[in-house]
């Protein structure tokens, strides 16, 4: 596939993302207000910018850990087969866990990750996703907190890639092929 002939058109500004992060962090901090054992789990690699911004707005004692699942490779379509490439470093049994995901698309990734983590018996398991594409859902699953609901477009920026590029854009844009 030729990855050179596309443009990135603005969709969500860095300013809107920052404002939404603040709101989400307030809601999440309130929900987990009594916790003394929260672990914030970022799904690599797409959530690395979001988790950095969100975690710094959380008014809670927390640890940070990461989980990496198999990705889209270089394509635009999910493989639907989810594999764990890098597991958590820490135990989560009896702990509060907040999973941070970049996008919930078909839902396969979140479904797989949630069942895996549930099997380890956390006290509470919640999910915050920056973006949600409900029109694409194939598995009935939802995040507990969502930054923005978006239409069925392929997006990049703010940690999210197309063929590993554009993760370092400060805003979120949609990929438009020439
Ligand atoms: P799902 O398993 O289909 O829900 O896919 C979730 C993962 O696919 C996300 O964590 C993203 O890494 C990736 N993904 C889904 N939509 C997009 C997109 O528009 N741009 C880049 N990556 C995407
Ligand atoms: Mg991802």
Image (tube, grey):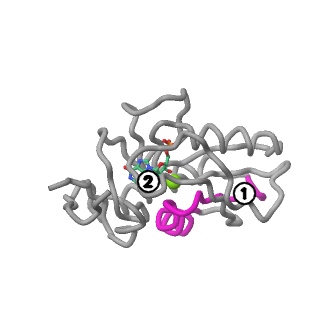
Left/right of residue 177 with respect to residue 78 in the rendered view: left
Distance between mark 1 and mark 2 Cα atoms:
19 Å
Could you say where residue 99 lies in the image, as x and y percent from the top left? Answer: 62, 51
Q: What segment is highlighted magenta in the picture?
A: 35-58
What label sits on residue 23 in the rendered view?
Answer: 2
Could you say where residue 144 lies in the image, as x and y percent from the top left? Answer: 55, 39
Do residues under tags 1 and 2 come within 8 Å of each other at their CB atoms? no
Q: Name the image quarter holding the C terminus.
A: bottom left
Left/right of residue 91 with respect to residue 172 in the rendered view: right
Could you say where residue 60 lies in the image, as x and y percent from the top left? Answer: 65, 62
Q: Residue at x 52, y 69 (%)?
A: 52
Q: Residue at x 31, y 39 (%)?
A: 152
Left/right of residue 22 with respect to residue 35 in the rendered view: left
Q: Nearer the viewer, residue 143 or 106?
A: 106
Q: Is residue 47 rendered magenta in the image?
A: yes
- At label 2, counting other C-alpha atoms closer than 10 Å, the crowd grade (few under 14, some 14-19, many 20 or more) is some
Outermost left residue: 178
Question: Can you tell which quarter of the image residue 13 is in?
Answer: bottom left
Using the image, determine if residue 140 lies above or below residue 16: above
Q: Residue at x 85, y 49 (%)?
A: 93
Q: Name the image quarter holding the N terminus.
A: bottom left
Using the image, determine if residue 31 lies above or below residue 89: above
Q: Residue at x 31, y 59 (%)?
A: 172
- Foreground mark, 1 or 2, reads 1
Sooner in the amino-acid sequence: mark 1 or mark 2: 2
Q: Is residue 32 rendered magenta in the image?
A: no
What label sits on residue 38 in the rendered view?
Answer: 1
Query: Of helix, strand and loop, which one carries label 2?
Result: helix
Q: Is mark 2 within 8 Å of ligand 1?
A: no
Outermost bottom residue: 168
């Amino acid at each position: 596939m030729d990855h050179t002939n596309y443009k990135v058109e603005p969709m969500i500004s860095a300013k809107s993302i920052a404002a939404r992060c603040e709101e989400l962090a307030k809601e999440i901090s309130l929900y987990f207000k009594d916790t003394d054992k929260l672990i914030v789990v970022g799904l690599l690699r797409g959530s690395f910018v979001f988790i950095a911004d969100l975690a710094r707005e959380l008014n809670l004692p927390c640890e940070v850990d990461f989980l990496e699942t198999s990705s889209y490779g270089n394509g635009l379509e999910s493989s639907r087969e989810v594999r764990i490439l890098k597991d958590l470093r820490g135990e989560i049994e009896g702990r509060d866990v907040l999973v941070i995901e970049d996008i919930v698309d078909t839902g396969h990734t979140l479904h797989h990750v949630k069942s895996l983590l549930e099997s380890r018996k956390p006290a509470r398991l919640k999910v915050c996703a920056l973006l949600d594409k409900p029109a694409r859902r194939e598995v009935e699953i939802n995040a507990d907190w969502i930054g923005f609901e978006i239409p069925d477009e392929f997006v990049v920026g703010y940690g999210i890639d197309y063929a590993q590029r554009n993760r370092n854009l400060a805003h979120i844009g949609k990929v438009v092929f020439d």
